[in-house]
Image (spheres, helix red, strand yellow):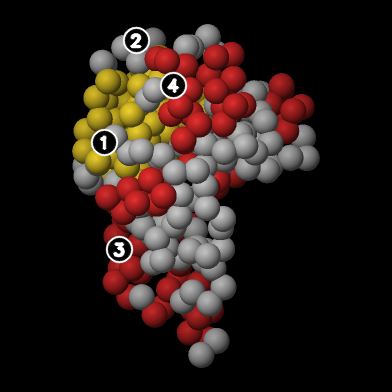
Amino acid sequence: MAEWRRQCAGKNGWSDPAPPVRIFANVYNVGTCGIVVVLIAGPRGHILLDAATADAAPAVAANIQRLGFRLRDVRLIGASHEHLDHVGGVAELKRRTGATVMAMPAAFNPLETGVMLRRDPQSGSLPPFPGVRVGRMLRDGTLVQLGPLRLTGHATPGHAPGGTSWSWRSCQARRCVNIVYADSVSAVSADGYRFSDRPRYVAAFRNSLNRIARLPCGLLITPHPAASNLLERLEGQAPLIGPGQCRAYAQRGRKGLNERLATESAAR
């Protein structure tokens, strides 16, 4: 972590290069100073969750190799949600690894075209990104298996329509931990978008927050490290592993959504 602190001092950009960091057991962050990219290593191939931006893709690839892994052993690429800061680099990393890209139905078209759906709260506020062929369609609760690796994909729309959270179990020696890579839960949007005008979307958002809160969760990871205090936890300033992390994260999401709805109501 000392090297990470030196390299990322004063930086938290989506594409600012950062060294790789081991989170726990076979789970690593190979992303940037401001974006988490999760590598889950296995003896029969590895799974990558998210890819940061297109500009960051070479650095993400270099981080994987720096850990001693071969790019061609990355077999699957999944995502948290279909915004350029998290999936802009998927096309380049697929080209370098040959991996199969996985996506929930709502994320399928944005990933293939590089353009967000019009119903995405942030539609129009973020530029497009390089599109990529999706080779595997997921469903809520899909179990993804790669050798001994077992990950479950959970549809958690809200921050984006295709929002996906991931849960799995990793073991280090005799200690096994339930890990959750939970999608972003912030109610942010493009100018002019009103959550209060879309009650069905808000209901789905609330359901996603409830689902995240209920996941078996001993170690929480989030697409933006600051959202879960990840770096400070890795440095020992707060517990890395412990109960209630997903519940607390979901509660912060509920608070933010409620505040956003209240602000919109007051502005009428």
Q: Is residue 115 left or right of residue 168?
A: right
Q: Of helix, strand and loop, which one carries label 3?
A: helix
Type of residue at label 2? Pro
- The residue pinned by badge 4 equals 97
Q: Are marks 2 and 4 in contact (CB under 8 Å)?
A: no
Q: CA distance from mark 3 to mark 4?
A: 34 Å
- The residue pinned by badge 3 equals 204
Q: Earlier in the sequence, mark 2 or mark 4?
A: 2
Q: Which mark is residue 136?
A: 1
Type of residue at label 3? Ala
Residue 177 location in percent, x, y? Answer: 36, 26
Nearer to me, 80 or 27 = 80
Q: Which mark is residue 145?
A: none
Q: Is residue 39 left or right of residue 150?
A: right
Residue 178 location in percent, x, y? Answer: 34, 30
Q: CA distance from mark 4 to mark 1?
A: 16 Å
User: Would you identify the image quadrant in which residue 35 lies?
Assistant: top right
- The residue pinned by badge 2 equals 43
Residue 80 location in percent, x, y? Answer: 41, 44
Q: Residue at the spot x=63%, y=42% of the render?
A: 14
Q: Nearer the viewer, mark 3 or mark 4?
A: 4
Q: Of helix, strand and loop, which one carries label 1?
A: strand
Q: Is residue 212 left or right of residue 195?
A: left
Q: From what the image shows, is residue 60 above or below residue 123?
A: above
Q: CA distance from mark 1 to mark 2?
A: 21 Å
